[in-house]
């Protein structure tokens, strides 16, 4: 019980620090769009609310990517059939 609580506390401290650093990077030059999801991923290992927030962020990023590049190929789609021989 003590080890589980200690682990959750360490994950909260490390993940919270990374997210806080990412929020600072929003207003200063830096890759906040990489650091904040990384911090949420650390927090999501122990906290359900962080996992929910990370999944929501992934859905929004996917929707934005589909809006910006609507004709890109999905890597899970099967390859097209080969062309007919002449």
Image: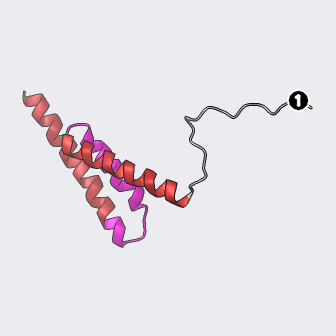
Q: Position of residue 28 (x, y in %)?
A: 37, 72
Q: Position of residue 45 (x, y in %)?
A: 26, 37
Where does the C terminus fall, quadrant-wise? top right
Q: Is residue 76 left or right of residue 17?
A: right
Residue pictured at 58% horizontal, 35% vertical: 77
Q: Which residue lies most toward the left here?
A: 1
Residue pictured at 31% horizontal, 49% vertical: 56
Counting the numbered discs, the total is 1
SS for callout 1: loop
Toward the viewer: 47 or 65?
65
Residue pictured at 45% horizontal, 58% vertical: 64
What is the crowding at mark 1: few (fewer than 14 residues within 10 Å), some, or many (at least 20)?
few
Toward the viewer: 58 or 20?
58
Residue that mark 1 sits on: 85
- In magenta, the rendered stretch is 24-46
Toward the viewer: 51 or 41?
51
Q: Position of residue 41 (x, y in %)?
A: 32, 44
For residue 36, which quarter of the picture?
Answer: bottom left
Does the magenta segment cover residue 55? no
Does the magenta segment cover residue 31? yes
User: Please, is residue 46 above or below residue 65 in the view?
Assistant: above
Q: Is residue 85 left or right of residue 51?
A: right
Q: Position of residue 52 (x, y in %)?
A: 25, 45
Residue pictured at 60% horizontal, 50% vertical: 72
User: Please, is residue 24 above or below residue 6 in the view?
Assistant: below
Q: Which residue lies most toward the top here?
A: 1
Q: Which residue lies most toward the bottom here?
A: 27
Where does the N terminus fall, quadrant-wise? top left
Secondary structure, magenta segment, majority class: helix
């Amino acid at each position: 019980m003590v080890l589980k609580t200690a682990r959750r506390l360490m994950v909260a401290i490390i993940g919270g620090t990374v997210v806080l650093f990412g929020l600072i990077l929003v207003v200063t030059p830096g890759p906040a769009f990489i650091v904040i999801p990384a911090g949420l991923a650390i927090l999501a290992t122990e906290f359900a609310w962080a996992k929910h927030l990370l999944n929501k962020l992934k859905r929004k990023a996917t929707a934005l990517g589909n809006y910006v590049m609507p004709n890109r190929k999905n890597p899970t789609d099967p390859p097209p059939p080969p062309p007919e021989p002449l």
